[in-house]
Image: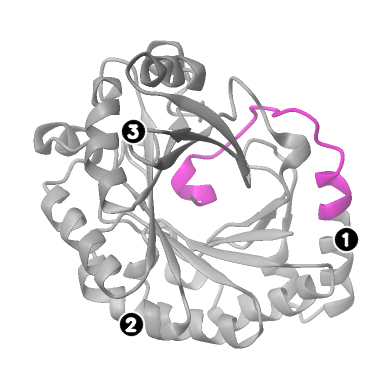
Amino acid sequence: MYLRISITDRCNMRCLYCFPKGYKKLPKKELLSFEEIIELIAVLKDFGLRKIRITGGEPLLRKGVCRFAEKLFSMGIPVYISTNGALLERFAHSLRDSGITRVNVSVDSLREDRFGFITKTPLLPQVLRGIETAQKAGLEVKVNSVLMKNINDDEIFDFLDYFLPRKIRLRFIEFMPFPHTRNQFEKLFVPYEEILNRISERYSVSYAGTDGVAKEFKIKEFEATVGFISPVSKPFCRNCDRLRLTASGKLKVCLHSGWEFDVKEILRHGNKGRLKEAVKEALELKAQISSPRWKAERSMVEIGG
């Protein structure tokens, strides 16, 4: 089992596929405390928890994130983090010292004007410096890019040329329908096979297996692999073992399913027996999902990246 923990819904970017206009941040009292999250993780360990990823919002905005990561690491579970990279230059060494060995960074354009359009910020140079600092700190860096038709899908080769020679793992992710993006879905969606075909027209590409839910392909000319996450065109539900914990304390069995459990309410009432029951029920429901339900009722920032 793999748990993705959103520790905050606050973010210093406003990515168009993640952050709806007019979104109101959660009051701080509605966020799970780090102590509450650790209590849940102690229960999940008994059910086979093997990996944790800290997400947001932007997780590096939450005070005490490195100490929290250190506590998780001390529980004997590998801990990773996903970030937009804007604060990575400042936090890279502290993350390494906390026990984190790998960071995932979202980069959806290498052109400052487009980056600004997608994220509503001018922070691309800061993000790229953060990636460089993370590498120098000894962290493994993986870059995730959501490709969108007529927005950034002409940058495929720019991404390959920039990241692969720098020994940075690269994954392309399909654009997904959320409540505020459903009316744009047909306009912006690019299936992974189209991206793969474009790459194959220029380079020698061969299938290299899977890494979690990502399909990996080796590009001979770079002596490196590129990954594809295709939840829309090639769903991977049968191979997905992820649970998600939202910043508001909902344990979700799937990004696009309405099935969830209010573990914050359970934790704050001190009902450990009910907490174990909720986890067991969540895992049983998870096992029933064979295809995505596309019924996400909240935006990505509310659920967690």
Q: Nearer the viewer, mark 1 or mark 2?
A: 2
Q: Which residue is mark 3?
A: 221
Answer whether labels 1 and 3 touch (C-beta < 8 Å): no
x 28%, y 68%: residue = 134
Please indicate whether residue 186 sits to the left or right of residue 60 in the image.
Answer: right
x 16%, y 60%: residue = 129
Classify 10 Å Cα crowding around label 3: few (below 14), some (14-19), many (20 and above): few
x 81%, y 45%: residue = 286
Q: Which residues are magenta?
A: 282-304
Residue 64 x/y as whole percent? 40, 82
Q: Earlier in the sequence, mark 2 or mark 3?
A: 2
x 74%, y 67%: residue = 49
Q: Earlier in the sequence, mark 1 or mark 2?
A: 2
Residue 64 visible: no
Marker disc for residue 73: none
Q: Amino acid at mark 3?
A: Glu
Answer whether labels 1 and 2 touch (C-beta < 8 Å): no
Residue 204 x/y as whole percent? 41, 24
Report the predominant secondary structure element of the magenta stretch.
loop
Q: Which residue is mark 2?
A: 94
SS class, disc 3 = loop
Residue 150 x/y as whole percent? 27, 15
Q: CA distance from mark 1 to mark 3?
A: 47 Å
Residue 198 sits above or below residue 158 on the image: above
Please indicate whether residue 166 sits to the left or right of residue 68 in the image.
Answer: left
Q: CA distance from mark 2 to mark 3?
A: 35 Å
Residue 43 sits above or below residue 129 on the image: below
Residue 116 placement: quadrant: top left
SS class, disc 2 = helix
Is residue 299 one of those drawn in magenta? Answer: yes
Q: Nearer the viewer, mark 2 or mark 3?
A: 3
Q: Which residue is mark 1?
A: 280
